[in-house]
């Protein structure tokens, strides 16, 4: 099949037609190969260039690692068969671009050799990327070690029947209903640093409580952690395709079932708010396929239900992605600011200053469409609009594109350290905004921890 010219106006992929990413996919020993794939970085510095970039985005023929933007660079994964044509197209429309990764497979191979713990039941650490089962086992072990502090809820099962678990950290136990903070990661399968960061923060919160007796945040809040929102996709990235993004829900066979990348839904286009709007696709082969209906994915539905049951309790909603070093505010569905945008921005700016103080890492903050192209059906929009959680944010973690989704594992700890500082800054603002009282003496639950610190 000859590549379709991307310069043709109005070309869109039918709902059943595979993208070029599907058509050109090659596998070696059952594993997706990215040999010869390059990452193009396009700077859309004017309206004409931005419109041209959107044209490519809407044709859905490429894997956009970051959506079109006039503010931030846009990174696009390009298969070898399309390198010359897309380069010629960008030159034709006057778009400034550079190739920031000459061979993506090199980074995938390097990561495989250096940063992955292959045993499914390996001990949990934050100097390597672990499998889903290890992360879940660590969560359960924390509940066993610290039953007065940690509770695990099984809230459902994924498409492939993996348990969906939420960790609660609280001095009040499973039934506590203090003001709460929600953190999740891993909704996009290939963004490995997100679940690593969320689990790092949970571990730090436990460690500071039971070893260092730093109890301010644990006395003020119940904390809910879901480090792995898309376990099927995450396991698929470890076993078959490192850059898989979506869930692994069924989908119709494409041309006799030849194109496996047409499975799954983008779970961050699947939430039940403004579903099917801008920045989403009806094409099930697309990376931004919104699914057949709102909350069609069991992973999304389970968390929606869990949060709605606690919507009056949760005061701060934080979802973690990678990459770009951004803090995104609602609304994401269109270029519309929330009525309390300035208030949300003040909290965000303070958090980013706290983050920068740790390792000097700079983030930019703002409403999603002001920094990127709109994306409807996202979780932080849903949290604010449907669950009525006033303070809802999306963190796009390290880096700015040098490594992208294959961020070296030696950056997990510094990413976690600086992000935890930002989260604590936001927690401080929640304490002030909601006038949350903190006991001057340790709670009954906290006194139980004496056995852990002295034993």
Image (tube, rainbow, N blue to C red):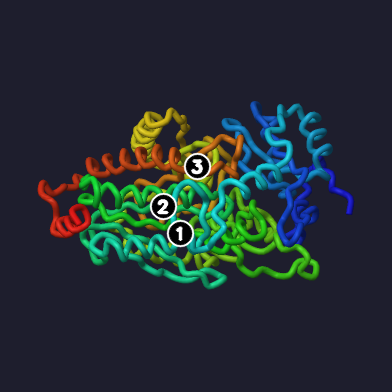
CB under 8 Å between discs 2 and 1: yes
Classify mark 3: residues with Cα within 10 Å, few (<14), some (14-19) or many (20+): many
Q: Residue furthest front?
A: 455
Of callouts 3 and 1, the N-terminal one: 1
Of callouts 2 and 3, the N-terminal one: 2
Q: Residue furthest left?
A: 441
Classify mark 2: residues with Cα within 10 Å, few (<14), some (14-19) or many (20+): many
**Disc 3 from disc 1: Cα separation:** 21 Å
Residue 104, position as x, y percentages in the image: 70, 43
Classify mark 1: residues with Cα within 10 Å, few (<14), some (14-19) or many (20+): many
**Disc 2 from disc 3: Cα separation:** 16 Å
- Which residue is denoted by mark 2 in the rendering? 199
Seen in the image, is 157 located left or right of residue 354?
right
Q: Quadrant of the C terminus?
A: bottom left
> Which one is closest to the eye, mark 3 or mark 1?
1
SS category of the residue bearing label 3: strand
> Which one is closest to the eye, mark 2 or mark 3?
2
**Of the pair 60 and 323, the residue shown nearer to us:** 323
- Which residue is denoted by mark 1 in the rendering? 135
**Of the pair 224 and 366, the residue shown nearer to us:** 224
Q: Quadrant of the N terminus?
A: bottom right
Residue 45, position as x, y percentages in the image: 64, 26
Residue 256, position as x, y percentages in the image: 79, 70
Seen in the image, is 37 located left or right of residue 127?
right
Residue at 49% x, 37% y is 326
Residue at 51% x, 61% y is 132
In the rendered image, is residue 313 in sight?
Answer: yes
CB under 8 Å between discs 3 and 1: no
Seen in the image, is 335 located left or right of residue 167?
right
- Which residue is denoted by mark 3 in the rendering? 396
**Of the pair 125 and 290, the residue shown nearer to us:** 125
């Amino acid at each position: 099949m000859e590549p379709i010219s991307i310069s043709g106006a109005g070309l869109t992929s039918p709902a059943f037609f595979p993208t070029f990413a599907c058509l050109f996919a090659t596998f070696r020993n059952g594993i997706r190969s990215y040999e010869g794939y390059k990452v193009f970085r396009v700077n859309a510095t004017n309206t004409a260039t931005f419109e041209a970039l959107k044209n490519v985005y809407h044709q859905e023929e490429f894997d956009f690692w970051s959506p079109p933007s006039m503010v931030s660079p846009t990174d696009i994964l390009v298969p070898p068969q399309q390198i010359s044509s897309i380069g010629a197209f960008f030159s034709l429309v006057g778009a400034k671009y550079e190739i920031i990764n000459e061979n993506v497979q090199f980074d995938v191979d390097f990561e495989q050799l250096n940063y992955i713990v292959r045993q499914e039941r390996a001990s949990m650490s934050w100097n390597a990327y672990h499998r889903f089962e290890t992360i879940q086992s660590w969560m359960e072990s924390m509940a066993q070690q610290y039953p007065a502090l940690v509770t695990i809820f099984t809230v459902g099962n994924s498409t492939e029947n993996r348990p969906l678990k939420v960790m609660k950290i609280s001095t009040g136990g499973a039934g506590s209903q203090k003001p709460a903070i929600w953190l999740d990661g891993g909704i996009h399968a290939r963004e490995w640093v997100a679940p690593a960061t969320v689990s790092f923060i949970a571990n730090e919160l436990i460690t500071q409580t039971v070893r260092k007796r730093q109890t301010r945040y644990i006395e003020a809040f119940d904390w809910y952690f879901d480090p792995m929102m898309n376990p099927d996709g995450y396991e698929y990235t470890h076993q078959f395709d490192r850059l898989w993004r979506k869930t692994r829900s069924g989908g119709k066979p494409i041309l006799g079932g030849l194109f496996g990348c047409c499975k799954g839904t983008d779970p961050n286009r699947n939430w039940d708010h403004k579903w099917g709007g801008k920045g989403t696709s009806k094409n099930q082969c697309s990376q931004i396929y919104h699914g057949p209906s709102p909350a069609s994915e069991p992973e999304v539905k389970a968390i929606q239900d869990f949060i709605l049951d606690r919507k009056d309790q949760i005061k701060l909603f934080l979802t973690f992605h990678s990459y770009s070093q951004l803090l995104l505010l609602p609304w994401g569905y269109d270029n519309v600011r929330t009525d309390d945008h300035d208030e949300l921005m003040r909290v965000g700016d303070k958090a980013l200053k706290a983050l920068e103080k740790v390792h000097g890492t700079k983030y930019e903050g703002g409403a999603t469409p002001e920094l990127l192209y709109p994306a409807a059906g996202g979780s932080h929009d849903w949290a604010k609009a449907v669950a009525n959680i006033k303070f809802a944010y999306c963190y796009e973690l390290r880096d700015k594109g040098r490594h992208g989704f294959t961020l070296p594992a030696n950056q997990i700890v510094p990413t976690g350290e600086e992000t935890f500082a930002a989260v604590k800054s936001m927690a401080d603002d929640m304490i002030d905004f909601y006038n949350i009282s903190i006991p001057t003496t340790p709670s009954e639950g906290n006194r139980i921890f004496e056995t852990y610190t002295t034993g």
